[in-house]
Each structure stands twice: as structure tokens, then as C-alpha cells.
């Protein structure tokens, strides 16, 4: 890659980093991406795809397969703690997952494709909204405009702190876990704090649920995890015994069957405890992510690409515990999500002092180029 092109992508990445937007609110980010691609002359630009998503279509001269390359537009509700020139200018919002870097990689791929169009078929570069909440991929797939970029293959990468820079992490089958956000609401009856016996407090029930939920995973043979992430009891009023409580937890498994079992066990536990304390119970779910399952043929293209580039490759046996909504595309095409090492000493994803390492941008571009060469030339 030419030094000037690399610097252009670094500048683009840092500009995105300074102006992050949360899931579903990525309007300005999408405009920045569109402006970047304005000089690349794609055959078509599709806007407002599943929200603020957008896609750029590059067509070959001959008929052939269609491939989608996907990256993410959204940032996280995290207050960045770094002291860098390109620090986020938006309070409590930062690209602490590296989506700014992923966008720079796909933008660089756009530069490459614009310079040499595919010989056959169609390449679709998708900048997807709302990945962090699990809503984006589903909304893109449900959008009537999606048919224009429906592809035979779909590829994406995610940078992976803790792995050596530029190492490629691959796995057949399940690559990332399924997860669901569980919202548990308990309703009792408030009373004067001097006479708690006149009310029905959910305090003890709430405590039992917080302790009990993580323990139900012991009844499931394969990987499962319950993490209580938030709890709230009553109001801050020292004269009142609380009458309501809420608990929020994230449930994770590596297959749909065990997710069903985990949900059943969690609901049964909450129901028994609520009944014991004469409380009304309601349960709802949010931020639902399916497992990301890698296709064998798509995996082979990525594996061959890494070999041609002479990159160090790590073949993992166990799926990652975190979740990604890219798995939604598995219902429409042969998908592959692979990892790109971002440094052993790199801060972890979602940490306040994380910043995407620009030096891995060329490797991400090169991987996608070599994958596309096998399919479209």
C-alpha cells in the first residue's frame, strides 16, 4: 500500500474516532463514509439500509457470484479515558470496540476495488448500523433494499486484542457465542420504612435471583454463562420500604438448544422465587445475538488468503464468549467471521483506554483482497 493511501485511511479512521455515534444514531458517520467513497465511483450506493446503514456496489464485466464484505458504523456508550489528539469529542461515547478501524479497512478495500474492478460477479461493501445492540444485521436483512446486495458469500473481521499484531484467527463452525439480555421485573407493595411488615418488599427475592442465576449454568454440559449486569431496588427514600425491583442479566451459550435450556432454567428460578415472596413477575428480553457460524467453504477462502500473504494463522478450538450480530447473515449466505490480531499488549475491547491500532489496517485490506481474488477472478 502506498504511504499516501495509508495515511489517508489513518486520517479517516481518526476523524471517525473523534465523532462516534451510538447504535441507531449513526447519521453523521454514514455521511462521512459516503463522502469518502464519492471519489471511488461505485456502480451504486444504497443509503438508509436498515437504519443509517449504507452499501457500495462494484460490478464486474462478467456474470458471477456475489460477495458481501461487512463492517460496523456504531460506537459504545463509554467515556474514553485516553489522552490522544484524536480523542472522542462526544461525551460518554467512544469507538472502544474498533469499529472505526473496521470501517477504515473496508474503505481501503473500496480504494483497491475502485482501482481494479472485479472480473466477474458483484462485490458489496456494507457499512452496517447498530451492531452493538444486535439490531442492525436483522434490520438490514429485513430492509426491502437488501435484495440488491444479497450475496453468495459474506465476510467480516474483528480485531482481537491479546493476539499478536496481524495474526489471523480462524475457526470452522461456531465462532462467537449467542447471547440475550434478560430483564426481570419484580412487583410487590411499598410501605413505610418503619412498618415494612405492612408491605411486600422484593429485596430478599432480588438477592436470591442475583446469587442464583449464575449458578444455573452448572446444569448445562457445554459452555453457558449468566452475568448479572445491573440491579435496582425501590427508590432512594429512607422513609419507604421498596415495592419493586429489577435485575438485568446477560445469558450466553454456543448453540441455540442450550440457549433454550438456559432461558427455561432462568425463568423457572425467577418464577419460584417470586412465588415464594408473593411478588408479581415479568420477564422480557433485549439485545439478542445468534451464534456466528462459519461456513467451511468461506473458511477455506480465508485460510488460503492467509497462506498466500504468509501471515501467521491461529486455528482455535473453542468459540469466543462474546457475541456478534454478523451471524444473522448465515441465513442468507455462506458466512465467515475471522479475527485479526491487534496486539498482545493492546487494551481489551470495550475498555475505556482502547484505541484501534492503525498498523493492522493494511493486513485487513490484504486479507479481503485475497479472499475476493479467489471468488471474482
Image (cartoon, rainbow, N blue to C red):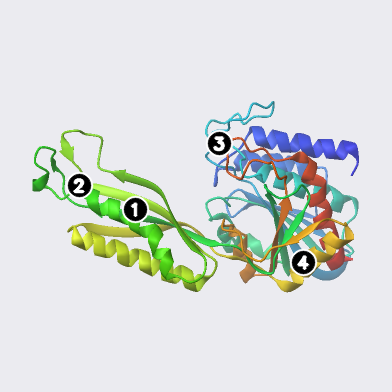
> Looking at the image, which residue is at 58% across and 33% down?
80
- The quadrant in which residue 327 appears is bottom right
Other residues around mark 4 within 10 Å, as few (<14) / some (14–19) / many (≥20): many
Q: Closer to us: mark 4 or mark 1?
A: 1
Q: Which mark is residue 93?
A: 3
Q: Closer to us: mark 4 or mark 3?
A: 3
Horizontal relation, residue 58 to residue 188: left or right: right
Q: Closer to us: mark 4 or mark 2?
A: 2
Residue, disc 1:
210
Q: Between marks 2 and 1, how big is the CA–CA gap?
A: 17 Å
Q: Closer to us: mark 2 or mark 3?
A: 2
Earlier along the polypeptide chain: callout 2 or callout 3? 3
Q: Between marks 4 and 3, how big is the CA–CA gap?
A: 35 Å
> Looking at the image, which residue is at 58% across and 52% down?
131
Residue, disc 2:
243
Q: 105 above or below 303?
A: above
Quadrant containing the N terminus is top right
Residue, disc 4:
66
> Looking at the image, which residue is at 16% across and 45% down?
190
Earlier along the polypeptide chain: callout 2 or callout 1? 1
Earlier along the polypeptide chain: callout 4 or callout 1? 4
Q: Between marks 3 and 1, how big is the CA–CA gap?
A: 29 Å
Amino acid at each position: 500500500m502506498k504511504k499516501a493511501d495509508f495515511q489517508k485511511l489513518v486520517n479517516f479512521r481518526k476523524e471517525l474516532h473523534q465523532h462516534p455515534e451510538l447504535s441507531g444514531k449513526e447519521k453523521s458517520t454514514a455521511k462521512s463514509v459516503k463522502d469518502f467513497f464519492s471519489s471511488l465511483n461505485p456502480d451504486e450506493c444504497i443509503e438508509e439500509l436498515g437504519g443509517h446503514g449504507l452499501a457500495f456496489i462494484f460490478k464486474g464485466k462478467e456474470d458471477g457470484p456475489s460477495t458481501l464484505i461487512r463492517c460496523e458504523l456504531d460506537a459504545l456508550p463509554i467515556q474514553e479515558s485516553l489522552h490522544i489528539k484524536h480523542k472522542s469529542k462526544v461525551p460518554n461515547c467512544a469507538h472502544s470496540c474498533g469499529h472505526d478501524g473496521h470501517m477504515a479497512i473496508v474503505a481501503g478495500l473500496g480504494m483497491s476495488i475502485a482501482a481494479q474492478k472485479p472480473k466477474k460477479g458483484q462485490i458489496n461493501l456494507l457499512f452496517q448500523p447498530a451492531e452493538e445492540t444486535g439490531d442492525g444485521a436483522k434490520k438490514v436483512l429485513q430492509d426491502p433494499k437488501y435484495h440488491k446486495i444479497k450475496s453468495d458469500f459474506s465476510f467480516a473481521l474483528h480485531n482481537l486484542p491479546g493476539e499478536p499484531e496481524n495474526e489471523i484467527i480462524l475457526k470452522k463452525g461456531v465462532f462467537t457465542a449467542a447471547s440475550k439480555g434478560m430483564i426481570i421485573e419484580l412487583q410487590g407493595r411499598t410501605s413505610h420504612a418503619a412498618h415494612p411488615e405492612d408491605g411486600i418488599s422484593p429485596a430478599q427475592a432480588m438477592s436470591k435471583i442475583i446469587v442464583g442465576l449464575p449458578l444455573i449454568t452448572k446444569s448445562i454440559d457445554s459452555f453457558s454463562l449468566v452475568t448479572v449486569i445491573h440491579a435496582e431496588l425501590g427508590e432512594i427514600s429512607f422513609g419507604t420500604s421498596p415495592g419493586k425491583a429489577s435485575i438485568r442479566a446477560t445469558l450466553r451459550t454456543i448453540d441455540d438448544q442450550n440457549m433454550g435450556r438456559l432461558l427455561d432454567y432462568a425463568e423457572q428460578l425467577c418464577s419460584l422465587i417470586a412465588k415464594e415472596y408473593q411478588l408479581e413477575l415479568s420477564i422480557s428480553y433485549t439485545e439478542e445475538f445468534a451464534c456466528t457460524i462459519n461456513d467451511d467453504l468461506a473458511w477455506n477462502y480465508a485460510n488460503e488468503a492467509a497462506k498466500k500473504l504468509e501471515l501467521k494463522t491461529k486455528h482455535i478450538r473453542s468459540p469466543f464468549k462474546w457475541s456478534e450480530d454478523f451471524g444473522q447473515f448465515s441465513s442468507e449466505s455462506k458466512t465467515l467471521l475471522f479475527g485479526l490480531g491487534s496486539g498482545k499488549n493492546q487494551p481489551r475491547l470495550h475498555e475505556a483506554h482502547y484505541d484501534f491500532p492503525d498498523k493492522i489496517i493494511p493486513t485487513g485490506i490484504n486479507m479481503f483482497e485475497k479472499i475476493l481474488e479467489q471468488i471474482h477472478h
